[in-house]
Amino acid sequence: MTGETMTEERLFDSSHAALVFAFNFSGQQYLASAMNKAMTPALGRGKGLIGLDGAAQAGMIRAELGMLPELHQAVLTARTAPRDIPCECRSSCCKGRRPNSEWAGAVAWLTDRAMQQLSGSFSHYRVRRSILEKIFGARVNLAEIAEGCGVHRNTVSDQNAKLKLWIEGERAKKGLNAAPGVEQVAWTAIDIRLKASGMVKSEVAA
């Protein structure tokens, strides 16, 4: 075939872009909303991933995510799902946004699992959860966590270091190799699945 390329065009440039699309896609909107229009060039490479096509694509991405271990699913959900979503309840106290139960559920699951990383030390549920929320993008600092939970600042700092090491790993140091965290392992796993399925671009040598 004339002009045939060595690689088949993929829908997404990265697994991160694919997951962000899947978690932000609203299957009930069959017309392009302002968000869809803004996201399509960046995430869908101009293919118009809206309506039924977008719902199908989001479903396939989620299906691949669902094949991973629960720990990896929770980490990737906490990293890429929105923390809050639009709300149209029209309540007088509504500000147009509400917490995303999917993101909150992933953080809650990780909060329970984090007990294993803090064995042998005092472990306060609210501290663990607040630290994990911070790791996954919530705007809160360690001093605020300590004050809000009634825990000493040193305790919060120590547990923050341990949980960051668990999630994010440790960079290579002089004489020592890098220690990957569970998030890096999870990204490697979803990369393999999404590239194999043809939904994410895979670099192929000419």
Image (cartoon, rainbow, N blue to C red):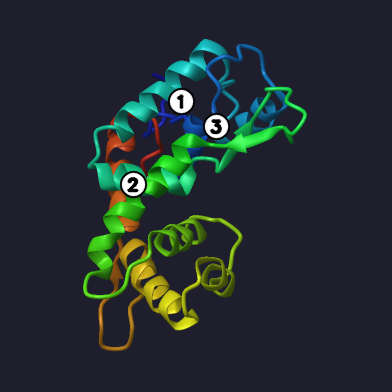
Q: Of circles 2 and 1, which is in front?
A: 2
- Element marked by disc 1: loop
Q: Find residue 141 and report its horizontal and vertical position in percent.
A: 58, 69
Residue found at x 33% / y 37%: 195
User: Please, is residue 21 above or below residue 28 in the view?
Assistant: below
User: Please, is residue 80 above or below residue 129 in the view?
Assistant: above
Q: Of circles 3 and 2, which is in front?
A: 2
Q: Find residue 176 and report its horizontal and vertical position in percent.
A: 25, 83
Q: Of circles 1 and 3, which is in front?
A: 3
Gap in angstroms between the C-alphas marked 3 and 2: 21 Å
- Element marked by disc 3: helix
- Quarter of the figure with residue 69: top left
Q: Is residue 204 visible?
A: no
The reply, left or right, for residue 171 in relation to residue 142 is left
Residue where numbered disc 2 is placed: 109
Gap in angstroms between the C-alphas marked 2 and 1: 49 Å
